[in-house]
Amino acid sequence: MSEDFIVGFILLYISLLGVLSNWTVLLFLSKVSSVHVSFGSLTRNQALGDAFQTTTVLFVVVPMVFFDIKILKENSNLISFIMLFGYEVSVLSHLLLSCNRLCAVASPLKYHQLYNQRLTILMIAIANLYAFASIIMFYASGCKYFWSSDLHMFMYHVSNSCVDISFYGIFCKYLTIIVVILVIDLFSIYKAHQLFRHAHSDCVTKQINKKEVGLLVQTCLQGMLFSIELVCYFIISPRVQSKWAQFFLTTFAFSTIHACDGAISIMCNNDFRTMVFRNSFNKFSGPLSKI
């Protein structure tokens, strides 16, 4: 069994999970009335970034690896920038979601006034435009990421400019964003704990209920996964010699976090999870019930 077949097989199942989960969130989360419009819109934008990445892996990278498609490998630089755009949108959406959850638990009475639909759309538009501009600037710099068939990962051409851009423009930028997200999430957890301890009335108790805790858990889990991936990709992988270890610390980790994002969004939202699994069960059981 060839190495390309093993890599393609692994990426096939990861990306398939990501495509199913993220497109489910993107297309159907808006149908859940219990999810606040702002939080739902931000989560769907995050799913959009994840869907870009996982769909590209499933329909472009997997066939490229399985069938050794030369034209795709020669233009893998363009593929990598599409995936980086999805990553950028996803990370920025995480930041906006963390701020959203902090406001929800720290100032629940003002949350619905502050996070209205107009402001949410504006934040999403700015984040996505910034992500697109960042990728265009990265591409215009001449630094190219290409697929390495030997190491089964995307790598940049080794040059002083590419090393600097990769370190400062990708690692340092994303590390800063992830650290900010983790700090916000920790403070949100602290505020939620404080409100639970000092809840003396039904009004306060209803403001911080199980639904809000589930959504806070969602943002914390997703932020933690991205921080782990960042450490694996940029800190641990350059220090290992085994190419399989590098594959799992880079390509595998990069694809897995995007696949898990959608699954976490589904599992941490009770109403959405119920809708998804109930509808799926009804579709499969419907034909059987008519026999």
Image (spheres, helix red, strand yellow):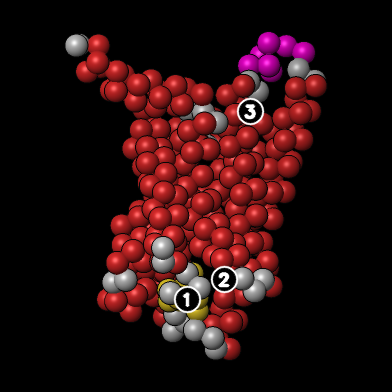
Whether residues under marks 2 and 3 lie with C-beta atoms below 8 angstroms apart, the answer is no
Dominant secondary structure (helix, strand or loop) of the stretch shown in magenta: helix
Local packing at callout 3 (Cα closer than 10 Å; few below 14, some 14-19, many 20+) is some
Which residue does the image show at 53% across and 51% down from the upper left? 257
Q: Position of residue 236 (x, y in %)?
A: 68, 66
Which residue does the image show at 45% across and 54% down from the upper left? 10
Residue projecting furthest to the left: 291
For marks 2 and 3 on the same chain, the one whose residue lies earlier in the sequence? 3
The amino acid type, in three-letter code, at marker 3 is: Val
Quarter of the image that includes the C terminus: top left
Give the number of the disc on residue 243.
2
Q: Give the residue pinned by disc 3.
A: 213
The amino acid type, in three-letter code, at marker 1 is: Asp
Q: Residue 17 versus residue 128: which sits nearer the camera? A: 17
Which residue does the image show at 76% across and 17% down from the upper left? 199
Residue bounds of the magenta highlight: 200-206
Whether residues under marks 1 and 2 lie with C-beta atoms below 8 angstroms apart, the answer is yes
